[in-house]
């Protein structure tokens, strides 16, 4: 028998859980810690394809992703009243990637990966890594409850503001590169708007702002807003910012 290999993964999102699943399937003992108290229900819609699809296929979760996802029929740019200005069948996008495309909410994609975890993976919510150490033979991660975990591999999958990266490599500002955009996502119930959207992605935009609307099977509408900005700081009042910047789009 070979030596047991151990991994600590900080972050129980899509990347962290995927890494845990792949490692555990090849015999690694895996502990995953995440600062959230449990799986996050919030998230935006993802048009899922490409390398992520290939990884999901290797995990054997494509049928589940198709079950949880949405087969959008077309993408339409609309005016302030919702009237189509330009339209493109989604089948054209799907054809380019051999049909390996579906639209899925981020928490649903995370759910599909989480369901694929081998039973031995130890996922600990409500925990953060407060210190990292390294020797010639192992790496240690001190968790905020005082426990020290020792492993052969530490993976920082804790997002754009990664605590693991800062503990290992230094302050975030030495690595952070702002691309000039902010993104907001939310869902709401509006039967009239839902009837207007139907089975399409409705996109209303200008040069500096864009909004994407998808109708969910439970009757909610999920929206994603993207705008250009020179300020990387998050707004003090996101709702007020969305209202002021996007009101003119209808």
Image (tube, rainbow, N blue to C red):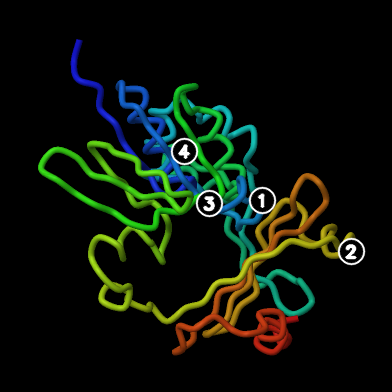
Residue closest to the eye, 132 or 209: 132
Residue with the mark numbered 4: 100
Q: Badges 2 and 4: C-beta atoms under 8 Å apart? A: no
Q: Is residue 144 above or below residue 4?
A: below
Q: Does residue 93 appear anywhere in the picture?
A: no
Query: What is the crowding at mark 4: few (fewer than 14 residues within 10 Å), some, or many (at least 20)?
Result: some
Indicate the quadrant where residue 215 lies: bottom right
Point out the residue furthest to the front here. Answer: 146
- Residue visible at 67% across and 83% down in the picture: 237
Quarter of the image for residue 49 reads: top left
Quadrant in which the C terminus appears: bottom right
Tell which of 135 and 124 is nearer to you: 135
Question: How far from the left and from the top, in percent, is residue 112?
Answer: 56, 35
- Residue at the spot of label 3: 47
37 with respect to 34 (left or right): right
- The span from disc 1 to disc 2 (Cα, nearest Å) is 25 Å
Which is more N-terminal, label 4 or label 2?
4
> Rounded to the nearest whole Å, what is the CA distance between mark 3 and mark 2?
25 Å
Horizontally, residue 134 falls left or right of residue 147, namely left
Mark 1 neighbour density, 10 Å: few (under 14) some (14–19) many (20 or more): few
What residue sits right under mark 2 in the picture?
Answer: 192
Q: CA distance from mark 1 to mark 4?
A: 25 Å
């Amino acid at each position: 028998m070979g030596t047991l290999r151990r991994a600590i993964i900080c972050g129980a999102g899509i990347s962290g859980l995927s890494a845990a699943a792949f490692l555990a399937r090849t015999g690694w003992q895996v502990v995953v810690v995440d600062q959230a108290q449990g799986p996050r229900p919030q998230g935006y819609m993802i048009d899922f394809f490409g390398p992520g699809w290939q990884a999901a296929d290797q995990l054997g979760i494509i049928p589940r992703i198709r079950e949880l996802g949405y087969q959008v029929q077309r993408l339409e740019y609309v005016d302030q009243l919702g009237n189509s200005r330009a339209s493109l069948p989604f089948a054209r996008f799907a054809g380019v990637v051999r049909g390996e495309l579906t639209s899925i909410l981020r928490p649903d994609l995370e759910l599909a990966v989480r369901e694929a975890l081998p039973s031995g993976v130890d996922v600990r919510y409500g925990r953060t890594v407060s210190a990292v150490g390294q020797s010639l033979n192992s790496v240690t991660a001190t968790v905020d409850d005082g426990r020290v975990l020792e492993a052969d591999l530490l993976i920082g999958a804790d997002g754009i503001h990664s605590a693991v990266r800062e503990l290992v490599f230094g302050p975030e500002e030495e690595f952070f590169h702002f691309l000039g955009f902010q993104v907001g996502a939310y869902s709401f119930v509006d039967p009239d708007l839902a009837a207007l959207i139907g089975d399409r992605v409705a996109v209303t935009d200008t040069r500096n702002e864009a909004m994407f609307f998808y109708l969910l099977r439970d009757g909610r509408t999920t929206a994603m807003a993207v705008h250009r900005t020179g300020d990387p700081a998050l707004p003090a009042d996101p709702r007020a910012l969305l209202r002021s910047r996007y009101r003119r789009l209808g």
